[in-house]
Amino acid sequence: MTAGVGPTDVLAGRYQLERVLGCGGMGVVYRARDLLHEAFGDANAWVALKLLGEPLAQSPDGHVLLYSEFALTRSLRHEHVVRMFAFDVDTVREVAFFTMELLQGVTLDRLLLECPEGLPWSELQPLALQLLDALSYAHRQGVLHGDVKPANILLGDEGLRLFDFGLGQAQEAAGLPGLSRSRLNAWTPAYAAPELMAGGELSALADLYGAACVVYELAQGRRSAPRQPDQPLPRPRGLPRRCWPALRSALHWTPEQRKVTVAQLREAMAGVRRCWFV
């Protein structure tokens, strides 16, 4: 929780904080009421509001990182990516924050706890397709997510939403601050590509690896520990044989050996037969 800010506070004279929805390596997300919209009779005046957690709130470039996350995500317009609303600053408290749609549902890490043996293909396939659609779209827009894992994917009545681009970056210069997220040391070992854990640069292949780990886990069930380089993976019980070559390639320890793109992995999950990932 950010020092000096907590439930019941009103930020920028407009956003009434209600309760903490989640805390990550970079920030804290609150459920909040938009008092301005409420005053005009909006019956659905709730938003999710993200601000920096400690110790980033004290970092000289922390607010720049927060704005970079907002700007990256705002550039994306996709049904399976969280929608951004506005970036603002409470000048009295000197706290920067942004608002976004309030998502209703369950994150995939919670779903995995409820389904420790994995999901049947009839339930797994649409989730995999929606996740890979969202990530492929982001890559086409030049945006890398940086932290694809079950806790950053929410399943609700309207399908899946990918969120939390706090460790993401633009693939090319896009007028955004060129700040390194690696110093945050926020990678999740079970889903971060090995090259990231070794201090390498974020890439589309690293995002691919994270997404493949999520799909694998949804099919096989929750893993107990990160995989080692010499530890072969069995084909997941819930995955059709035709999909395994592409997923196995995406899960390769060495990035040069990941012979598929996110879009091609999506094709494989959809049942399109190719030979380039054998």
Image: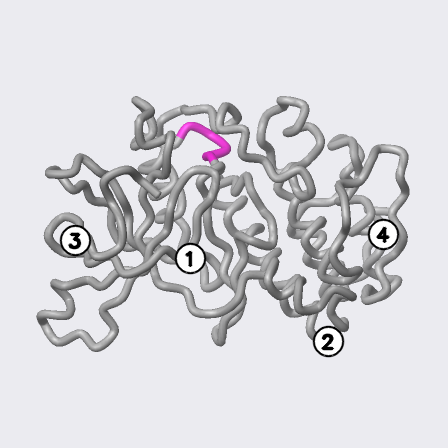
Q: Secondary structure at mark 2?
A: helix
Residue 50 higher or lower than 187, as above or below? below
The answer to which of marks 4 and 1 sits earlier in the sequence is 1
Q: Amino acid at mark 4?
A: Pro
The picture quadrant where one finds residue 192 is: top right
- Magenta stretch bounds: 169-173
Residue 205 seen by the camera: no
- Whether tag 3 and tag 4 are in contact, CB under 8 A, the answer is no
Q: Nearer the viewer, mark 3 or mark 4?
A: 3
| Helix, strand or loop for the magenta stretch, by majority | loop
For mark 3, what is the residue? Answer: 10
For mark 2, what is the residue? Answer: 122
For mark 1, what is the residue? Answer: 82
Q: Nearer the viewer, mark 4 or mark 1?
A: 1
The answer to which of marks 3 and 2 sits earlier in the sequence is 3
Q: CA distance from mark 3 to mark 1?
A: 23 Å
User: Is 264 positioned to the left or the right of 230 in the image?
Assistant: left
